[in-house]
Amino acid sequence: MPASPPTLVPSNTRAYWVEMPGRGSIRQESLSLPAPEGHSLIETWVTGISPGTERLVGLGHVPPECWSTMECPSMGGSFELPVKYGYCLVGQAINGPYAGRRVFTMHPHQNYAIIPDDRLLPLPEDFLPLRATLIPNMETALNAIWDSEYQPPVPVAIVGGGMVGLLIAFLLKTAWDSQPVIIEIDKQRRQLIEELGWGLTTLDPQASPREAFSLCFHSSGQGSGLQTALDSVGFEGRVIEVSWLGHRPVSLHLGGSFHFQRKQILSSQVSTIAKSKRGHLTHQQRLEQVLVHLQNPLLDALISQIIKFDHLPLFMQQLYHKNPDGFSFAVIYRPFEHYFQKT
C-alpha cells in the first residue's frame, strides 16, 4: 500500500528514562527541527526490549569498566542514572533519502528521533515492523554461529531457551540443516518452546547427557548455565559464551574433565564481527544477511507481548525484578492495526 502521509511532529517529543534503580518514567524532550543535513526525522512505530540487558541497566548494575562499551547510539544521561537507554527502533522516515519508508536504527525508546542517515537501515516493503524488532538478537545469534565455526553434522546444544538461544537454534535448523538440542531449566519455558512448532528438542539440565556434544552455546544469563554448558561438551568441545552477566561473578568447577578433555570457552560479542568473517564483511552486510534470515514468518511467534508506549514505565518496573513470560517484547507507538500493514 502507499506510504502513509507524514505525521505532524509535536513541539516536544517523549522518551523513556530510568530515573533510579528499578524505576523509570516518560520524559518530555525537545527536538531541534528541521533535522540537520545528513540526518532524518523518524516517527517511531515500535521499539524492542532486551530483557537481560535493560534489567542490568535499569537496576544500575552496569560495571563502570563496561560503561564505554555498553553505551548505545543516542543514549542520554549515564549508567550512574538517570539514563535513556535502548537499542532497537523501527519507524518511518519523514524526510531525507528514505522519506516515506520504514527504517531500522539503534536508539532508545522514544516517539520521534533525529538520526544520522548512515545509521538507518531501510527495510523491505513487505517487512512487518514488529518482526524488525528481532534484528539485534538475530544479529547476535548469527555472529555467535560464525564465531563457533560450526560445521554440520557436529552435535550441538544450546543452554538457555531465551531469545538469543532460540534464534541460534532457529538459524542452525533452517540455515545449517542441524538438529540442535536446547537445555532449559524452566519447565514452563520448555513448554513454550515446544508450542512454537519449530520441532526443537528441549531437555531439563538434569536429563541432559554429559559430554555428548562437540559444541554448546551458552545463553542462559546464569553462571550455573555456563557450568552446564561445559559439562555437556566432550573432548576438545567448545562453549560459545553469548550471555553478558554484568557485575555478577561466576564460579566454575574446572578441576574435573575441563583440562583433561581440553575444553574451550570462547566469548562472542556482536559489536565485533566474527573472526572468520572479519576483513571481508562489513556490519552493513551482516545486517543485510540478518534481514534475509528474518523473512521467515515462523519468527512472528516469538513476539510474546506488545506494550503501549504509555504503559512502558509499569512494564519495565516489573521487568527489573522478574522475567516476564514469553520471549520477545515490543513497544508500540501507533494504533495496533498499523503494525500489520505493508509499506
Image (spheres, grey):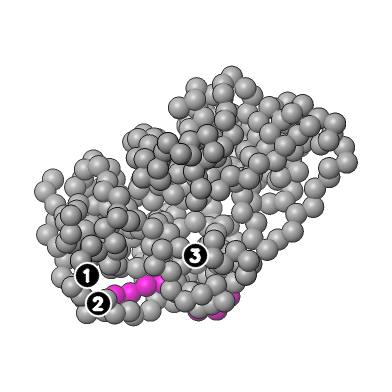
Element under disc 2 = loop
At which x and y percent is residue 129? Answer: 30, 50
At which x and y percent is residue 148? Answer: 59, 34
- The residue tagged 3 is 71
Task: Give amino acid for label 1.
Answer: Pro
Q: Find out whether the residues at labels 1 and 2 contact each other: C-beta distance under 8 Å.
A: yes
Q: In this orientation, does residue 37 appear?
A: yes
Q: Residue furthest front?
A: 279
Q: Quadrant of residue 280?
A: top left
Q: Nearer the viewer, mark 1 or mark 2?
A: 1
Residue beneath the point at 66% across and 41% down: 266
Compared to residue 332, the image places residue 143 above or below, namely above
Q: Is residue 105 left or right of residue 260?
A: left
- The residue tagged 2 is 32
Task: Give amino acid for label 3.
Answer: Glu
Compared to residue 167, the image places residue 338 above or below, namely below
Label 2 – label 3 distance at C-alpha: 22 Å
Q: Earlier in the sequence, mark 2 or mark 3?
A: 2
What number is the disc on residue 109? none
Q: Is residue 5 left or right of residue 335?
A: left
Give neighbour class at mark 3: few <14, some 14-19, many 20+ (Cα, 10 Å): some
Element under disc 1 = loop
Q: Residue furthest right?
A: 255
Compared to residue 157, the image places residue 30 above or below, namely below
Residue range of the region highlighted in magenta in the rendering: 13-21
Element under disc 3 = loop
What number is the disc on residue 36? 1
